[in-house]
Amino acid sequence: MAPINKPGTNVALGLCILLSLAGTSAGQRWLASWRHPVVRGALVWWAVLFLSALHTWYLTAKPPLGGSFVWTCWYPLALGSVLDDGRWRTRGLIAFAAAMALTLLLSFGMAAGWLPQRALVQSQPFMRNTVFKEYTQQGLATLIFGAMAMAAARCARPGKTRWILGFAAALAVVNVCFVIASRTSYLTLLPVAAYWTWQLLYRRWPGWRATLAMAGVGAALATGLWFTPLVQDRLVQSVDHEIVAYDQHHQATSSGIRIELWRRTLPMIASAPVFGNGLHQWEPLYRRSIEDMPNRQAFMMGHPHQELLLILAEQGVAGLVVYLLLLGALARYVLRLETPQRDIYACLLLVYLVAGMANCLWTDFTHRHVFILLLSCIPLRQQGESSKALDGSPDV
């Protein structure tokens, strides 16, 4: 429900927690969930944000603990008490994939004119063919769905099922490139495509032949995207025009706003480099910095559109070091998983990292919940555990 309905998502999560506490063996299930290293990692990041909130309270006398920005980190613990075995976690992934498959079909239906567009398309044309609240949200979620389909196809036996899953992955890429046309999704598609090229080619031709083949495929893909009119317009020409318009006329273009946000964030980081300025302090500091700007309303944003800059501004270098260590530990954990979960979560991590270079995903409700809820479905790897079926084939 995360992409469609914010109140419904919160109600569903609240009911999940209440019913988990009311169920049988609640203590044992919550304790088992606590043992999951991903759950502990999420709670470590909650502790960082909580300490940053206390820092803000000390500086401003106002505790910034409203909303789910901080408390989302507890969801893996709560959901782990319900998704208490590998089957339920797999069903969670399948549920997301099924919802995204329906979203993909609706998006293509809108593009073909078979379904009506949303009413806001008249004022915001770039929201065409979207079911989600915002087109970047849908583009990134569609990439995750495509990675899931590829991971399942890689593990499926040769035959019709593998072809269907491969076709679904191809449809996801087509939707991102030609139907949604989100620039953040374009940039994120490249490392995800590189990951799958590496996985598929090294499986067939280990060594230097795979490296050459991967470089050739990458060059062909980049060239094809570069000369595609829609991609070139959205990713090359429009960016150049936007920067020129911002530089010469100070227009509030998409690229110009980002340059202004990043330029204004650097002094914030310099003023409190070690522990930052405190949770939720970027926005008031930014508002004060643009008070004298003539068209300041057009540049008014709630975050700097860059995940690492936001952490540096609010939690400082200390918070950024913890953040990077947690991401490194998560990547190490993901690489130890069996397929297809290893491929799914490797791509999820890639999507989160690359998209975070041009957006603040953690401050957005849909981005945040899609990431943390999928992370809550990550399997628990135990010593000597195997995810192979009885006949030796991967348990897709």
Image (cartoon, rainbow, N blue to C red):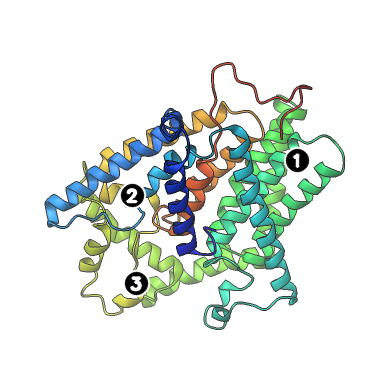
Q: Secondary structure at mark 2?
A: loop
Please name the amino acid that badge 1 sits on.
Answer: Ala
**Residue 348: image location, x then y, percent:** 55, 44
Q: Is residue 215 visible?
A: no
Picture quadrant of residue 67? bottom left
Picture quadrant of residue 299? bottom left
Discs 2/1, front: 2
Q: Mark 1 and mark 2 in contact (Cβ < 8 Å)?
A: no
Residue 299 is marked as 3
Residue 302 versus residue 109: which sits nearer the camera?
Answer: 109
Q: Residue at x 26, y 45 (%)?
A: 50
N-term mark: 2 or 3: 2
Q: Residue at x 71, y 35 (%)?
A: 396
Please name the amino acid that badge 3 sits on.
Answer: Phe
**Residue 394: image location, x then y, percent:** 72, 29
Q: Residue furthest right?
A: 159
Q: Secondary structure at mark 3?
A: helix
**Residue 6: image location, x then y, percent:** 47, 63
In the rendered image of this protein, does residue 109 appear above or below residue 394?
Answer: below
Q: Which residue is mark 2?
A: 70
Structural crowding at the residue carrying mark 1, measured as other residues with C-alpha within 10 Å and reported as few (<14), some (14–19) or many (≥20): many
Q: Residue at x 37, y 78 (%)?
A: 249
**Residue 390: image location, x then y, percent:** 75, 22
Please name the amino acid that badge 2 sits on.
Answer: Val
In the rendered image of this protein, does residue 340 appear above or below residue 176?
Answer: above
Discs 3/1, front: 1
Q: Which residue is mark 1?
A: 153
